[in-house]
Structure formats: C-alpha cells, structure tokens
Image (tube, rainbow, N blue to C red):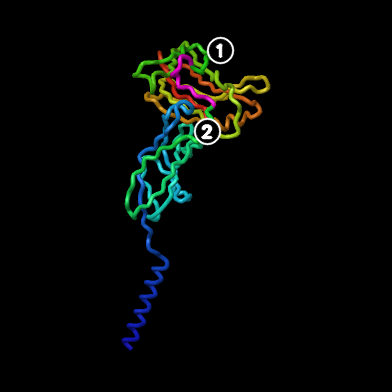
Amino acid sequence: MFLQSVKAIFFQVMFIVSSCTLSNPPQELPFYIRINSVDLSTDYSVQGSNAQKITDVWIYSDNNLTGAFELPALIPVVPAGNHTLTIRAGIEASGFTDLRIRYPFYEPFTVTLSQSSESTIELNPVITYYDSTLFLWLEDFESSGFTLGAAQQNTAPMLMITDPYIVFEGQKCIGIYLDPSLTFKAISEGGSSPFQIPQGDVFLELNYRCSNTFSTGIVVNQSGVTLDIPVLTLYPSPAWNKIYIDLTGPVKNYQNAGTFDVFFSAQPDAGLPVSEIYMDNIKLVTR
C-alpha cells in the first residue's frame, strides 16, 4: 500500500514537471549588438555634405523587425547564432522628437553575423543615399555665388561668411543679420528652380545656427497667383543643428501647380537689438 502511494505521488510529480516543461520551454538566449552612432558617406560633388543627424536605428533580423532604438543602443538579437541584420537610419522628421521615422533616402546597412549567446559585438554602420535619390537643389555656399536669392520684400543683408569660428564646415556659410528695422526673405533660384513637383517624398535638409526665429516653406503659382505656404518655424539654436524638413504633404497639396520653390523668411524677434541666422548645406531631395 505504501509502495503504491509512493508510485502515485511520483507519477503525479512527473506529470506536473512535464506539464511545466511543455508550457514553459527553455528560454532562448540572445546576443547583443552595440551601436553608438551611424555615419553617412556621400559623393560630395553630386550629393553634398556628409553632415547628418541620425538619432535612431531600425533593426531587422532576417527581414523581421526587431525594433527601433534610440542611439546609442544595446540591442538584443534572439536567438544567438547566424543572422542577417538590416539597419535602417532613423531621423526626427521636421525636428520633432515624437515623430521618428526611417529616413526614406538613406540606404540600409546590411551585415551577416554569427554570435554565441550573451556575447556583444560593436557595429559602426556607414550608410549612403540610395542611388535613386534625386538632389533637386544643393547649396553649400562654397562657390563665389549662391542659389538663394533675396526676395523683393527682403531688406536684410545676406552675406557670405568666412569666419572659421562661425562657419559650420568647409570655408563658407551664409549669414543673415537682423535688427528691428529689417525683414528677411529669400527664395531658391538657379539650377533646376522652380522645381517640378515629384511623385515621391520630398525633404529639405539644412544645417543652421541662429539667435532669431525663422521659417521655411514652399512657393507655388496657383492659377496665376503666387502663394507662400509656410511649413516649419525654426527656433533659436546657439549651436549648429541639422534638420530634415518634410515637405511631402505641402508639395502634394499643390500638385496642380506643377512647380514649386523653397523660401526662408524671418521677422526680428522682440527684444533683440541685433540677431543672426546662419545656414549651410541646403539639400532638396526626392525619390
């Protein structure tokens, strides 16, 4: 009787253990990749500066999304072993921290890894623009002239700046100086301006530094009437900043216009006797 009871208890325990094993399979252990930053490589003559502000990475393991991670990041890949990883560069669209997207003009970085469980490997991805990216406008202000023209309403001086303590990179940038009596407005000109309205996404890339608020947008000619369509206001930044401004929606809203230009404008901020706006590396891109 005692033996039968022991056997019964033993089989009950074995059943419970087996059930637990079936419902809780062994946990698969990951390996980790560490990415501190992502670099951009460009052909300067046709793609301009390699200045970028890549804030995030979107990771795909064997074409399956692992997740989006703010840089720097330590990223688990499950399970350990052989995987092909695709890394897409993410940016803050129009500078909004809550509007993080995969930048549609940067080609993914792909690497195949074979790592043991709980190991860590550091990656330093270098990405490029897609070959299909069209650069509608490139202005680095390094030539003797520039393709940003003063509008009729403009009264502010637009100067080529060569002071190395101000210039972002290279030898020059453009500077606009304001006081309470001056108004700034400039429009893209030269090259392929006015630009044909494309079918795909349209972004304006820009490096800027300013002590005065300024705006950017598009200019369209609708039924013989010229319209300024403001898109974004940029606020004072004491250090150089890079921004990716999404023009896709505004441009598509005026599809019937056929062409568009880009404008920048500013009124003097209240309380500032003198203020300045510096810009460099303007790019208008589409695919």
At numbered mark 1, what does the secondary structure look like: helix, strand or loop? loop
Q: Give the side of residue 224 with respect to residue 98, left or right.
A: right
Pointer 1 or 2: first along the chain: 2
Q: Quadrant location of the C terminus?
A: top right
Characterize the local packing of mark 1: few (<14), some (14-19) or many (20 or more) Cα atoms within 10 angstroms: few
Location of residue 274 in the rendering, given as x and y in whole percent from the top left corner:
40, 14
* Quarter of the image that includes the N terminus: bottom left
The secondary structure that most of the magenta stretch takes on is loop
Could you say where residue 184 lies in the image, as x and y percent from the top left?
A: 49, 15
Q: Is residue 5 above or below residue 167?
A: below
Image check: 109 left or right of 193?
A: left
> Tag 2: residue type?
Thr
Q: Residue furthest right?
A: 223
Q: Where are the magenta residues, as a range?
A: 136-145
Residue under the point 65% across and 23% down? 222
Q: Quadrant of residue 192?
A: top right
Disc ID at residue 244: none
Does 137 lie within the magenta span? yes
Which amino acid is tagged 1? Gln
Q: Vertically, is 173 above or below 113?
A: above
The mark found on residue 152 in the picture is 1
Local SS, label 2: loop
Alpha-carbon neighbours of circle 2 within 10 Å: few (<14), some, or many (≥20)?
some
Q: Which residue carries the number 2 mark?
A: 133
Front residue of 257 and 173: 173
